[in-house]
């Protein structure tokens, strides 16, 4: 019975506006939750207690990030049950999120970026290779979330104005402008697709490419190049370099952050800008000899 209710929740999530990535997390975590409860011989959803939820969250000695995914999935699922009046209270809301220590984001050096670009551009003679190369260009130049990139449709791109309609978390939409070099490759790629609608990036099975496929792609590249590659590193790197030339507000807009505090975590202090600021600081021009003679 619980599996059927989870299926109903996932169908509801599609209409509610959860991203495809969020639905993947819900499906994975709630399936494991249902399997975990089988050992307790629970006959009704109303028999599930806080202890049952907690035992699932900590089962298997998971990392803090996995615990967070489990708790988030349970909170959303039990809120759905409450809204449907299947239960009276969302007991999952009482489970605290684990403390995750924030670390300085990793970023790629210019040399590493050049090596990665050369690796992917060497395979652009095939449709799949060109697809992978353009995904990497979106990551390097724009720092977009991988989910946003994979959700791009052909009709979202306007090569005349060099603009892109991006769909962000929570189904938020915004328009950003693309560098000319990216538009040049996009023109060749879209022309080769011979269609004007639908997802920009398809798998060999003619379905929208998945997040897992991209992870596997980067894992292969990491093994060949000896460089740890993941989509988040590209985002950190793009943010850092963009902040050097455009400042925090522009970087915030391109990354799609709602708060400046989120953007600050992604950018590193640029010593060149800092040095120039110190040169122009008004106190740097004070004549201390004149002041001491007064």
Image (cartoon, rainbow, N blue to C red):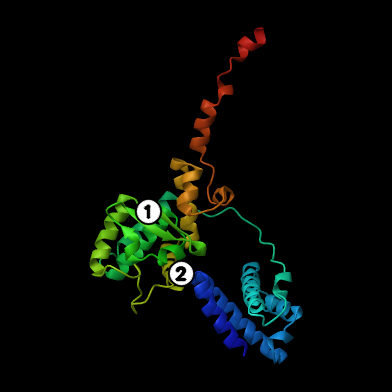
Q: Which mark is residue 215?
A: 2
Do we see residue 180 in this rendering? yes
Which residue is found at the position 59% from the left and 85% from the top?
Answer: 5
**Percent position of residue 137, x then y:** 37, 57
| Residue in the foreground of this view, choosing between 87 and 211 | 87
Element at label 2: helix
Q: Is residue 76 above or below residue 289?
A: below
Q: Is residue 257 above or below residue 197?
A: above
Examine the image and state in which quarter residue 120 appears. bottom left
Residue 219 bears which disc, if any?
none
Spatial CA distance of label 1 from label 2 is 20 Å
- Nearest the viewer among 56 and 288 is 56
Marks 1,2: beta carbons within 8 A: no
Tag 2 or tag 1, which sits nearer the N-term? 1
Residue 78 percent location from the top left of the image:
66, 77
Residue found farthest to the top: 294
Residue 108 in sight here: no
In the displayed structure, does residue 224 sit left or right of residue 187?
A: right
Left or right of 89 on screen, residue 139 = left
Q: Would residue 246 be found to the left or right of residue 45 on screen?
A: left
Relative image position of residue 174 (x, y in whole percent): 43, 56
Please give the residue where the numbered disc 1 appears in the rendered image.
Answer: 114
Q: Dividing the image into 4 quarters, which one contains the N terminus?
A: bottom right
Using a 10 Å C-alpha cutoff, classify the residue at mark 2 as few (fewer than 14 neighbours), some (14 to 19) or many (20 or more). Answer: some
Decide: is 283 above or below 255: above
**Mark 1 secondary-structure assignment:** helix
From this view, report whether residue 223 is shown above or below residue 138: below
């Amino acid at each position: 019975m619980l599996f059927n209710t989870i299926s109903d929740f996932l169908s509801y999530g599609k209409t509610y506006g959860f991203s495809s990535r969020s639905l993947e997390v819900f499906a994975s975590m709630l399936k494991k939750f249902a399997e975990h409860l089988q050992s307790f011989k629970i006959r009704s959803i109303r028999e599930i207690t806080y202890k049952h939820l907690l035992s699932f969250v900590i089962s298997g000695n998971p990392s803090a990030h996995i615990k967070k995914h489990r708790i988030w999935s349970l909170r959303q699922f039990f809120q759905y049950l409450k809204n449907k009046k299947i239960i009276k209270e969302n007991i999952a809301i009482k489970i605290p999120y684990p403390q995750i220590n924030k670390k300085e984001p990793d970023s790629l050096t210019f040399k590493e970026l050049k090596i990665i670009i050369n690796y992917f551009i060497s395979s652009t003679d095939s449709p799949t290779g060109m697809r992978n190369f353009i995904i990497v260009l979106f990551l390097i130049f724009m720092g977009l979330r991988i989910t946003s990139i994979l959700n791009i449709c052909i009709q979202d791109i306007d090569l005349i104005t060099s603009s892109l309609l991006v769909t962000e978390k929570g189904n938020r939409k915004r328009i950003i402008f693309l560098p000319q070099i990216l538009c040049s490759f996009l023109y060749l790629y879209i022309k080769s697709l011979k269609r004007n609608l639908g997802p920009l990036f398809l798998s060999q099975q003619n379905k929208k490419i998945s997040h897992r496929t991209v992870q596997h792609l980067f894992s292969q590249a990491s093994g060949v190049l000896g460089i740890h590659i993941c989509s988040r590193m590209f985002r950190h790197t793009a943010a850092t370099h963009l902040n050097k030339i455009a400042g925090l507000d522009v970087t915030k807009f391109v990354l799609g952050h709602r708060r400046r505090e989120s953007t600050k975590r992604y950018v590193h202090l640029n010593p060149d800008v800092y040095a120039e600021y110190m040169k122009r600081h008004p106190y740097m021009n004070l004549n201390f000899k004149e002041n001491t003679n007064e």
